Image (cartoon, grey):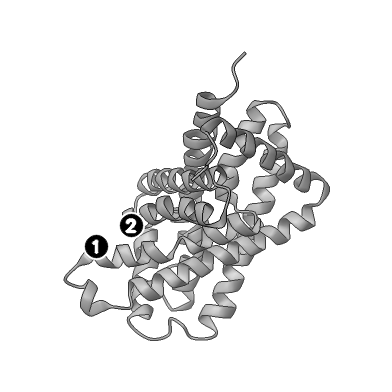
Amino acid sequence: MNIKTPSETLTASIKGACAKIENTLKHPQRLFMAAIAAGAFIAIGGILSLMVGFGFPDVTAPNPSMCKLLAGVMFPIGLILVVVLGAELFTGNNAMLIPAYMERHYSFKAIIANWTLVYLGNFVGAVGFTYLFVFLVGLTAGDPWHSAIIGIGVAKTSMSWWVVLLKGIGANWFVCLGVWLALSGHNLLEKAFGCWLPVMAFVVLGYEHCIANMFYLPLAMLEGAPIGIGECLWNNLLPATIGNIIGGAVFVGCLHWYLHRPRN
C-alpha cells in the first residue's frame, strides 16, 4: 500500500481543516447539514453494534468478551461513512482543526464556531435517526435488545464524573487515530480499514464517545430506562465531551503537529 508519510498526512489534515473552517464561516448551513448526516451515521453504527453485539445471548453469556467484540466489529461503519462521504463529526474535528490552528491559518474563535455548530448538528442527526428509524420501527422493543439498551443507559449514567472524563479521553484518542489513519490512505479500502481498527478497539474497551451516546442515551430513555435528561447531560455527555476534546485535540492534533510539522 502506498500510504502517505506522517508528514504528508499532517499536510492533508491542514488542507482539510482549512476547508472545514471556510465552510464554517461562509457556508454554515452546509456544515450543519453535513453534521446532521454524521450524527445519523454514528447512530447507524450504534444500532448495528447493539443488534449484533447483544443478539447472540447463548453465545456471549459464557464468553463476555464476545459481546464486546461483536459490537466493536460493527460500530466502525459510522466513522467510515463520515470519513468517506465527507460528513462533519465533532469528535473528528477535535483533532483535525488543531494543526492548522497551530500554523496560524485561523483563530481559535473559528474552531469554537465549528465545534459548536457541528456538535449541535450531530445531536440532531443522532437523536432524529434514533427516534425515527430505531424507536418508532421497534428495533429494540423486544428482548434481548430492550433490556440491553436499558442496562447500557443506566451504566453510562452511573459512573463517576472523572471516570467518564478519562474514558472520553481514551475514546477520542482512538477515534481520531482512526481519522488520521484514514487520511494517510488513498483508496476506499485503506480509509475504511484505517477507521475500523482503532474504533473497534475503543468500543471493545468500553470508552465513552459523546456522539455515540447521543444515540445510546436517548434510546435508553425512550425504552423506559430510569434515567432523566439531567443525568444524561451531567453524568455522561458533559464529561465525555470534555474528555473527547482532550483526547482528540491534545493526544492527536497537537501531538502529531509537534512530531511531524515542517521544521526550519
The spot of residue 18 in percent (x, y) is 72, 39
Residue bearing mark 2:
204
Find the distance from the CA under tag 1 to the CA under tag 2.
8 Å
Q: Quadrant of residue 162?
A: top left
In this rendering, the answer to whether 143 lies above or below 168 is: below
- Identify the residue at the far left of this view: 62
Residue 125 appears left or right of 205: right
Q: Kindly identify the residue that appears in the image at 59 percent across and 67 percent down.
A: 40
Q: Residues within 10 Å of mark 1 (few under 14, many from 20)?
A: few
Q: Quadrant of residue 69?
A: bottom left
In this rendering, the answer to whether 122 lies above or below 178 is: below
Residue 38 visible in the displayed image: yes
Q: Kindly identify the residue that appears in the image at 78 percent across and 52 percent down.
A: 28
Q: Kindly identify the residue that appears in the image at 78 percent across and 43 percent down.
A: 22
- Identify the residue at the far front of this view: 1
The disc labelled 2 sits on which kind of residue? Answer: Val
The spot of residue 160 in percent (x, y) is 35, 50
Q: Kindly identify the residue that appears in the image at 51 percent across and 57 percent down.
A: 189
Viewer-side residue, 202 vs 232: 202
In this rendering, the answer to whether 96 lies above or below 34 is: above
Q: Earlier in the sequence, mark 1 or mark 2?
A: 1
